[in-house]
Every structure is written in C-alpha cells, then in structure tokens.
C-alpha cells in the first residue's frame, strides 16, 4: 500500500475516533454487547454489526473475513474501528464495500 493511501486511511480512522469510535489497535470489542465496526481488509471496507459471544469463536477465528477473524485475530487488517451499538436490538450482519 502506498503512502498516500495509508495516510488517507489513517485520517479516516482518526476522524471516526473523534466521533466516538475505538481503534482496534487500542482495544478489542466486548464480546457480550452488540458492536458496530468498520475494517479495512484486503483493499475493501467491511462494515457490520455483531455480538461476538454469539459466534463460534473457534471456527470463525480461522475463517478469513468472518467477524471473529477481523475483530479478534486482526490479521492483515490495515485499519479498524468499532463502537457499542446504540440499538442493542439491531440486526447483526456484514457488508463489503470499496475503500473510503
């Protein structure tokens, strides 16, 4: 990844941190609460909501692209942020988009 792209992603993460998001580099998300996340992985933005305690951690830990793989293992994650979801009853899910 070239320097201008890395700089753009770092400023993207810092902007989200100023809005209350937490960097994956600083702290891992709680397993028992619904969290929202954005992760840059393999040149894509992966966003979603998940309650990690409801997932099979052993299977997900080794499955590339799974929420457990991205949020707990963090392998090849360039940048990532999370926050506790305001609506704890929201529907969990994940979507893949192009980078910001």
Image (spheres, helix red, strand yellow):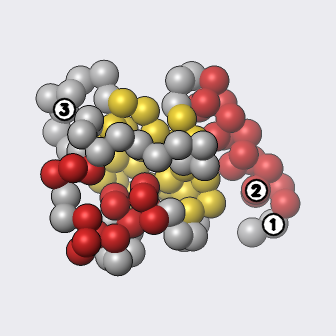
The answer to whether residue 100 is seen in the rendering is no
Q: Secondary structure at mark 3?
A: loop
Q: Which residue is mark 2?
A: 6
Residue at position x 66%, y 30% in the image: 15
Query: Are the residues flagged by discs 2 and 3 in contact, CB closer than 8 Å?
Result: no
Q: Which residue is mark 3?
A: 90
Query: Dot 2: few (<14), some (14–19), or many (≥20) neighbours within 10 Å?
Result: few
The answer to whether residue 12 is seen in the rendering is yes
Query: Dot 1: few (<14), some (14–19), or many (≥20) neighbours within 10 Å?
Result: few
Along the polypeptide, which appears first: circle 1 or circle 3?
1
Vertical position of residue 2 compared to residue 16: above or below:
below
Which part of the image, by quadrant, shows the N terminus? bottom right
Q: What is the x, y in percent for residue 36?
A: 36, 38
Q: Which residue is mark 1?
A: 2
Q: CA distance from mark 2 to mark 1?
A: 6 Å
Q: What is the x, y in percent for residue 51?
A: 24, 45
Query: Are the residues flagged by discs 2 and 1 in contact, CB closer than 8 Å?
Result: yes
Residue at position x 24%, y 23% in the image: 87
Give the left or right position of residue 51, taking residue 9 as reference.
left
Query: Dot 3: few (<14), some (14–19), or many (≥20) neighbours within 10 Å?
Result: few
């Amino acid at each position: 990844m070239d320097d201008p792209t890395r700089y753009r992603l770092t400023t993207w993460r810092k902007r989200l941190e100023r809005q209350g998001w937490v960097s994956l580099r600083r702290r891992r998300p709680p397993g028992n609460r619904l969290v929202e996340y954005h992760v840059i992985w393999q040149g894509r933005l992966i966003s979603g909501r998940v309650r990690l305690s409801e997932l099979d951690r052993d299977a997900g830990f080794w499955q590339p692209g799974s929420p457990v793989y991205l949020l707990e293992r963090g392998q090849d994650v360039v940048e990532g942020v999370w926050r506790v979801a305001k609506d704890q009853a929201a529907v969990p899910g994940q979507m893949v988009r192009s980078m910001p």
